[in-house]
Image (tube, rainbow, N blue to C red):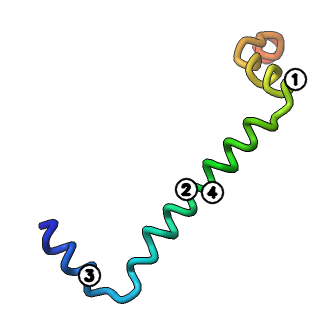
Amino acid sequence: MLKYIKNHMESIAGIEIYPIISLLIFFIFFVALFWWVITAKKDYINRVSNLPLDNHQNEDIL
């Protein structure tokens, strides 16, 4: 089955660019995410990390 798919893919012209494009998209995404994590402000990180433990807002709803 894999042999059939591989032979079929080799017959498509210009298909070798798609793995390169997908690798670039994923690499750029993770580099941007890493950059955002490094440059995030510490007070924002602390506020967001304490959201699941903050019960004051949940008590108002109930």
**Left or right placement of residue 51 versus residue 11 in this view:** right
The quadrant of the image that shows the N terminus is bottom left
Q: Are marks 4 and 2 in contact (CB under 8 Å)?
A: yes
> How many circles with numbers are drawn on the protein?
4
Location of residue 50 by image quarter: top right
Label of residue 28 in the image: 4
Instruction: Tell me: residue 48, above or below residue 18.
Output: above
Residue depicted at 82% across the width and 21% down the height: 47
Dot 1, how many residues are within 10 Å of its Cα: few (below 14), some (14-19), or many (20+)?
A: few
Dot 4, how many residues are within 10 Å of its Cα: few (below 14), some (14-19), or many (20+)?
A: few
Q: In what element is the residue under mark 3?
A: helix
The residue where tag 1 is placed is 43
**Left or right placement of residue 13 versus residue 33 in this view:** left
Identify the mark nearer the N-term, 4 or 1: 4
- The type of residue carrying mark 2 is Phe
Label of residue 10 in the image: 3
Identify the mark nearer the N-term, 4 or 3: 3
Identify the mark nearer the N-term, 2 or 3: 3
Using the numbered discs, state the Cα–Cα distance from disc 4 to disc 2 in whole angstroms. Answer: 6 Å
The quadrant of the image that shows the C terminus is top right
Residue depicted at 81% across the width and 38% down the height: 39
Instruction: Tell me: residue 3, above or below residue 60.
Output: below
Label of residue 26 in the image: 2
- The type of residue carrying mark 3 is Glu
- The type of residue carrying mark 1 is Asp
Q: Position of residue 32 (x, y in %)?
A: 69, 50
**Left or right placement of residue 7 versus residue 39 in this view:** left
